[in-house]
Image (spheres, grey):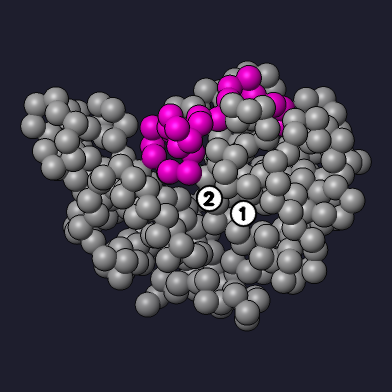
Amino acid sequence: MATKAEFIWMDGEMLAWADARLHVTSEAVLRGGSVFEGLRGYPDASGRLNLFRVPEHLLRLRQSARFMRLPIAWSDDQLTRAMCDLVRANGFDQTIHLRATAYFGEGLGYGWRPEDIASGLFVFALPNPRRAGAATGIRSGISSWRRSPDNAAPSRIKASANYHNSRLAQVEAQLRGHDVPIMLNQQGNVAESPSSCVFMVREGVLITPPVTEDILESITRDTVMRLARDRLGVRVQERPVGRSEVYICDELFLCGTGHEILPVAEIDGYAVGDGIPGPLTRRLQALYDDCVSGRLPDYVHWLTPVAG
Ligand code: PMP
């Protein structure tokens, strides 16, 4: 089992890790001019790796790039093949994280016009074990930093520059002794975490802020809502969530490609429920595991085999 990445796919070539470089005057470096996707691959029962919901990630990458007026020269088929080739070249067969980034490169002078700036795309992959806290729940708190509003730096777009806002909140949280913070939007409603979405359970109903509350249109959020409705028959509500609700809810969890389903055990010193992951959270964790590992026949169409 390879534990380190040897290769990076960049602009159509499989490069050695150390050779994948951008010039320091690239727009991606100077002004954070890039958009990206984070995907995961999981082994199935036979030990073969599958990537989870590739078409949905590529669609969101295109939406982010379109918004930035950043051209992508590759088709979905080419990018899917590139990701699978990359995983095979690196010899990974464990759970992995893939990062696909479309970037603006060097430009003509200091102009901003997309047509004056080179663009490209790279993909790298790394082993990615499950986050600490998945079994016991994490400590969270409400960040003093608000999520960027839609009419300034839209959170809907997975622009690398948005992660400046995420970083402020994440670093503050760690200084306060929290694992991951929850961020409010400018209206004071619950938005999301720096890298995942938020769900709470109140009286058996699964509740999450709608996509108009300054959140990323998360693919895991969509997966969780579908599994909860279709497999568990749980009522799901997308509605604004007030700050005080997360202090009194029965269950609270974060979800995202990287965090998967991450229970919150404590928020701002309040125990969530009994201070351990709640029953619906645990059922959703098990179902999500089954889904990404190919154990739910109804959802195997969400898996792209790396073996091709
Ligand atoms: N919100 C933010 C800010 C994120 O960075 C992520 C991770 N991509 C998510 C939510 C979760 O999105 P997804 O489920 O598509 O990974």
Q: Is mark 2 within 8 Å of ligand 1?
A: yes
Quarter of the image with the C terminus in it? bottom left
Amino acid at the residue labelled 1 = Arg
Q: Residues within 10 Å of mark 1 (few under 14, many from 20)?
A: many
- Kind of element beneath mark 1: helix
- The secondary structure that most of the magenta stretch takes on is loop
Which residue in the protein does label 1 denote?
A: 221
Q: Badges 2 and 1: C-beta atoms under 8 Å apart?
A: yes
254 in magenta: no
Magenta-highlighted residues = 139-163
As drawn, is 135 to the left or to the right of 54?
A: right
As drawn, is 235 to the left or to the right of 287?
A: right
Amino acid at the residue labelled 2 = Glu
Q: Is mark 1 within 8 Å of ligand 1?
A: yes
Q: Nearer the viewer, residue 267 or 135?
A: 267
Residue 143 in the image, given as x and y percentages of width and height? 64, 24
161 in magenta: yes
Q: Nearer the viewer, residue 1 or 25?
A: 25
